[in-house]
Image (cartoon, rainbow, N blue to C red):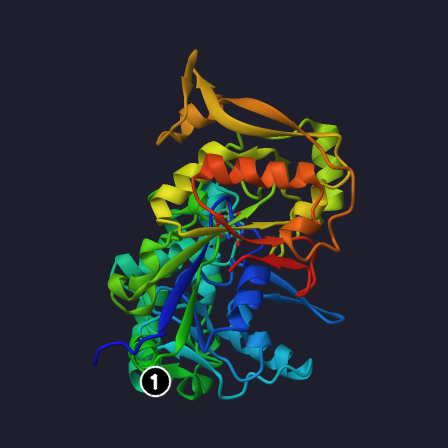
Amino acid sequence: MGARAPGGACTVVVGCQWGDEGKGKVVDVLAGDADVIARYQGGANAGHTVHVGDHHIVLHQVPSGVLHAGKRCLLGNGVVLDVDRFFAELDGLAERGVDPGGRVGVSNRAHVVFPYHKALDAAAEEAARRKIGTTGRGIGPAYESKTGRRGVRVADLLDRVRGVERVGRAIDWARARLRELGADPGLAGTVEDALALAHRLPTVATDVGDELARALAAGGRVLLEGAQGTALDVDHGTYPFVTSSNTTAGAAAVGVGIGPTAIDSVIGVVKAYTTRVGNGPLPTAFDPAMDERIRRLGAEFGATTGRPRRCGWFDAVLAAYSARVNGLTGIAVTKLDVLDTLPELKIATAYRIDGETRSLFPACVRELEQAEPVCETLPGWRTPTTGARSMNDLPANARAYLHRIEELVGTPIAMVSVGTRRSQVIRKW
Ligand code: IMP
């Protein structure tokens, strides 16, 4: 591939908390300037909610950029593809007047999630002493199949005979594992069920890395969309309460098949407060009344599972750690408007762990479970921010809050979101 033309730019959008930061909205806004949008990890565990006009659309696998007519949307090799749900999502978009036809492609190297992965996910959670609280979408077992070299890739399913043979062997393995976990081996399902919609894969299978390299070489703009968040990364998150992929920006290049030197910028998405769904520590958790209030104001229920999200104050220890791990060049702060009615706000600037004040996000989940946040308090603004379209439109206390986040995270703010609609955004970039 030749040298990149001037103007070609590749941006990664990555979650910097425990997922649900509002990446879908940020990608939807940035996709307006991009030619190609590609997901680099995760699967149907993700839920990106985008509001366009009167439509409220939840995307699980298709990149949020699909809502812009004419944009090419790709799922990279780092994604685990739930074939049935993927095609149901495409068909659902077509029914709602968003025609994805011919614009959506899937890496021929992506691994496929089958019904037996979901059965194994449920059985492993049932058998576990410490439950992770997974989304039940088979994500962990699918990545285990991949690293265990038992996986089935999109390319394998393009040939029916090879597909039947590989899936048959994988189902035999899954039955044995289900038995070990004390579950009914019949839950692994049949080869016919597993391959029901595989005949549609040739319409979408592609070499994603090659497509992206060509787009960049031709001066095109590429957006790489992450799922979940930094604190759910299998290496850098709150292990073992994490998802099973690398969610962080370093995984973007690997997950779509380009080199890291192709990436120009990394936008980290942080919610103006913190939420977490699933099990594991949340050091800045609100008291129950405040938790209830913010959950209601921010509609904090899982987009995939409907589970209530736990809510807490902005955690600058985590956000600064995320800035370092992801090499952020800018941050997008979302849902600022949810805080509009609060008389005062807190930001955690350190943790007290075992009598020690620490500013570095700990590696050990047991330490994080004991962490008491050290907070500073800032005055609220008690004014609606939903109509703001520039920083100058914001009340002074809201600007001060954002400025403090910027200082603590050590990264300039590129965007602020003040509502669910595409237009409710302040762009500095
Ligand atoms: P899994 O990804 O389904 O294996 O779930 C592992 C952990 O990641 C659980 O705590 C889930 O709640 C969490 N998780 C997975 N996907 C998302 C997401 O898109 N947003 C927020 N949390 C998620």
The amino acid marked with disc number 1 is Leu
The residue depicted at 58 percent of the width and 54 percent of the height is 22
In the image, taking residue 242 as reference, residue 422 lies left or right, namely: right
Q: Nearer the viewer, residue 252 or 107?
A: 252
The residue depicted at 75 percent of the width and 56 percent of the height is 387
Q: Is residue 183 visible?
A: no
Query: Where does residue 322 sit, x and y in percent of width and height?
Result: 41, 43
In this figure, which residue is indicated by the disc labeled 1?
A: 158
Query: Where does residue 218 sit, x and y in percent of width and height?
Result: 33, 83
In the image, taking residue 296 as reference, residue 407 lies left or right, namely: left
The residue depicted at 53 percent of the width and 44 percent of the height is 133
Residue that lies at the very extreme toward the top in this rendered image: 355
Quarter-of-image position of residue 238 = top left
Above or below for 63 versus 391: below
Above or below for 210 versus 179: below
Query: Where does residue 325 sit, x and y in percent of width and height?
Result: 35, 44
Q: Secondary structure at mark 1?
A: loop
The residue depicted at 51 percent of the width and 68 percent of the height is 61
Quarter-of-image position of residue 422 = bottom right
Q: Nearer the viewer, residue 227 or 7?
A: 7
In the image, taking residue 90 as reference, residue 327 lies left or right, namely: left
Q: Nearer the viewer, residue 375 or 250?
A: 375
Would you call the spot at circle 1 few (<14 residues within 10 Å), some (14-19), or many (20 or more)? Answer: some
